Image: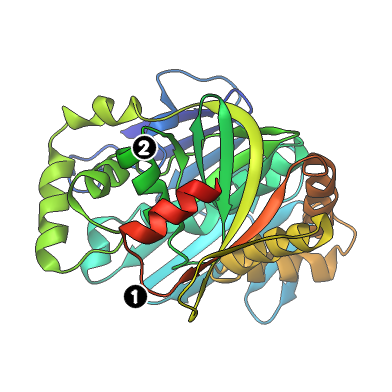
Amino acid sequence: MKQILNYNIHNLLKFQIIRDNKRDYVRDLNLPFSFFEVKDMDAPDIKLNIGKFTPSNNDCYLLDHKYHIKENYFYCKDSGGRAKWEVEIFGFEDGSTTINYNGKIDGSEALFPDRVPQNLLLQPFIEYKLCKKDHLFIHAAGVTNNNKGYILAGRPSAFKSTLTMDFVRKDGFKWMGDDRVIIQKNKIMCFPISPITFDFKCKYLSTEEFSGIFDRINLIKYLYNKSEYKKCDKSIANSAALDALFFINRTNKGTIKKNIISLNEAVGKLVENNRGEMILLHFYKYILAYSFVFPMSGIALHWDCLRINLETFLKDVPIYEVEIPQNYNSSVFNEVHDLL
C-alpha cells in the first residue's frame, strides 16, 4: 500500500511524493513542503517515487563508470555522507518528470529518510521547472510589510534567517521564506520551508542557530504538537510587490554600511548563490554528466536562462549591499531595519 502526498506551488508547479504507507511518526514531522500540501491533484509536473524499482537503463551512454544517460533519461547508483541510493529520472530535461529513488541512510539522519530525495532531487527540479515557467526559485529570505516585499540574499551564515525572524517577531512583518523565495517581474512569492521549525525559532531562539542539545529536544517536542501547525501559517504572506533586494554580508568591521550595487553585479551574485547551493548536492554532478552528452539541452542551459530572466525581472528594483558585523545583536537588527 502506497501513500501519496500532493503539493501545489502557487498553481505554478505541482508535484507528488509516493512512498510506503507505513506508520512512522518521526518521518512525518515537519515535512518541508507542508505549506503547499493539497488533497487531490491531476497531472503533476514532478512525481517522486520512494522505494525499490527496476531501472530501464538499457541503450545508455555510460559516463564516469556510473552515470547512465540517454535523451531525457538519467540513472546512477551513488552515495554521500551516511547515505547510499540509486536514482532513475524520466523527463530529465523536458516534459513531466518521474523520479524513482531507493536509498538507505545510517545514523540519526535515518529518522528522516525522505529528506535525502527531497533535498537532493526535488528542490533542483523545482528550481529548473519554475525557471522554464518564468518564475525564479532563488536562494534568499523574504519578508513583507504593507504589501512591500524585501529579499535578503547572501551566503549561508549571513544571518538572513535571523534577520527574517526579527522582522517577523519584533516588527510585525510577514514571512515569505528564510531559505528560498520565488520571484517574477517586480513580484515576490513565498516558499516557506518547514514553517513550524521557523515558528519555533521565532518563539524560543535568539538567532537561527541552535545553542545545544536541549534546543533540539524542545524542537522535537514542538513538532509533535500538531495544533501548532496551522497557527504558524498566519504569519506567512503569499505574495507582495518586490520593493528592494538586499545582499547581506558579514564583515570584521564594527559598523553597518549600505551600498548601491549594479544590476549586473546583483545578477551574478544570485546566479552563483544558486549554483553554490546546488554544487553542495550530487544533482549538480548529474547535470554536468547529462550536459556532456547533450550540451544544448534545456538543463545544460539552465544557468543562462536564470541569468537572462533575473536581468529582466530586477531591472527596475533597487538593489543594495548591506555590510553587518560578525556578531549579531539587537542593535544590528535595529540598524538594518532602519536601512529598509
Give the class, few, some or many, for how many residues have Cα within 10 Å of label 2's Cα (few <14, many ≥20). few
| Relative side of 320 to 206, left or right | right
Residue at 45 percent of width and 18 percent of height? 40
Which corner quadrant holds the N terminus?
top left
Three-letter amino acid code at disc 2?
A: Asp
Q: Quadrant of residue 108?
A: bottom left
Q: Nearer the viewer, residue 318 or 230?
A: 318
Secondary structure under tag 2 reads helix
Tell me where residue 9 appears, x and y as whole percent: 54, 30
Badge number at residue 82:
1
Tell me where residue 300 appears, x and y as whole percent: 81, 60
Tell me where residue 146 appears, x and y as whole percent: 52, 24
Residue at 76 percent of width and 51 percent of height? 72
| Relative side of 179 to 97, left or right | left
Q: Quadrant of residue 168?
A: top left
| Relative side of 312 to 173, left or right | right
**How far, Cα to Cα, is label 2 from label 1?**
41 Å
**Please, is residue 238 above or below residue 69 in the view?**
above
Q: Nearer the viewer, residue 338 or 326?
A: 338
Secondary structure under tag 1 reads loop
According to the picture, the residue beneath numbered tag 2 turns out to be: 171
Tell me where residue 217 appears, x and y as whole percent: 11, 57
Three-letter amino acid code at disc 1?
A: Arg
Badge number at residue 265:
none
